[in-house]
Image (spheres, rainbow, N blue to C red):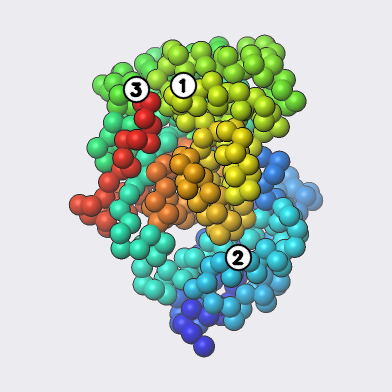
Amino acid sequence: MTDTEIRDVRGRRIWDSRGRPTVEVEIQLAGGALGRAIAPAGASTGSGEAVDLRDGDEMFGGYDVRRALRAVNDEIDQALTGADADDQAAIDAALIQLDGTPNKSRLGGNALVATSMAVAHAAAAAEGVPLWRRLGGISAHTLPLPEIQIFGGGAHAGRRVDVQDFMVIAVGAADYEEALDWTARVYIAAGKLMAAAGALQGVADEGGYWPVFDTNEAALDMMVRAIEAAGLVPGDQVAISLDIAASEFGSGGRYRLGLEERALDSDGLSEMLTGWLDRYPIVSVEDPLGEDDEAGLIAFTAAAGDRVQVIGDDYLVTNADRVQTAIEKHACNAVLVKPNQAGTLTEARAAFDTATVAGWGAVISARSGETEDVTIVHLAVGWGAYQLKVGSFARSERMAKWNEGLRIAEAIGAKASLPPPRVFPWG
Ligand code: 2PG
Ligand code: MG
């Protein structure tokens, strides 16, 4: 028996940032080490994602997770007890095989991802190091560039505006700490400008201001004003990043902007977005077209991929095979990596590696339903990911992650650095 042999797998029901039940898993190792992780939950999910197992009955709008917890405490506990937590790949392969479905629907992507991440934490604890250090080794020193939401829209704000995330990236910041300082200044400035306009109405699901705007583009104007009001230079110091989440307002190449009462075809939406690229300091656009509109994604990437990062989220769903296909088809030039879209850390890592080996960008990302779990920050540093997306600069389920990055930067010390500027060569 080794110290890293799994002694016990325990699931418990806890609550996420939307007040919905979610799965927490604790892994106890023979040597006494403990690992714990919590499953997040998306709202604008891609159809190819690993599926959360929800009870679907009258409790909590069908969102209860008693069945997923039973899976953890019965089948998963039995299968993993005695296995070696040191071998993440073998653990994840066992979880995938035990579930037996292509989309993790039998045991639940929520049960699987919480287990997979808890195993990683337990193995790190057994080694006596934080997870980022276990994954990245002693040479890990790169902090991810934060992508931080200022206005939340789409499915996270009752579709008040169509575009889902209006974010900033502090492209000119000298280090991680300064990137957060600058973002805090922009966030505060945006709140003051919204208040002055009589448009401050609280925040959306990820902590960005509620988007009280007449058009989607008006939010972009406000972003630029907020960056300037914070005393920063739009584009040079702080750039704009968007998640259009187009699958939420269109399918089959037909899109409907509810706010502006406009219908667009794929070319029309592409043209609208490239027009924004001409007029605003935008460095990154996620899901510009719907997940089923591959031709549209290819056309957009051909038109704009040399001056902006084009991220696939709903379209790629953290799946290495899909990333490989998209690389061959030039359908994007970056991937969003959400561990719970894949269901296990090994699969998420494969999607990340497939992208980065091809020279693509890769953004490790939280979900709109989150908790105090900070695993993704450790993955970003440990895997050497250049970017991290966590929602806004408010609400503790978001701040827990940004703050964990500060602790990791401090632990790395003088060698801690942001990625080289070539992340956004067009910035
Ligand atoms: C996204 C995420 C995070 P959700 O679309 O990128 O903003 O949203 O977790 O609801 O899928
Ligand atoms: Mg997205």
Residue at mark 3: 235
Q: Say which residue label 1 marks.
A: 200
Q: Distance of mark 2 from mark 1, alpha carbons? A: 45 Å
CA distance for labels 2 and 3 = 41 Å
Q: Secondary structure at mark 1?
A: loop
The residue singled out by tag 2 in the image is 92
Report if the beta carbon of the residue with label 1 is closer than 8 angstroms to ligand 1. Answer: no
The residue lying furthest to the front in this view is: 328
Q: Amino acid at mark 3?
A: Gly
Question: Is 92 located above or below residue 358 in the figure?
Answer: below
Which residue is drawn at the image coordinates 46% and 21% (left, top)? 200
140 left or right of 206 in image: left
Considering every residue shown, the one lying at the far left of the view is 414
Question: Would you say residue 375 is visible in this rendering?
Answer: yes
Residue at the image point whose x is 35% and y is 63% from the top: 137
Question: Disc 1 residue type?
Answer: Leu
Give the amino acid type for the residue marked by disc 2 in the picture: Asp
Mark nearer the N terminus (2 vs 1): 2
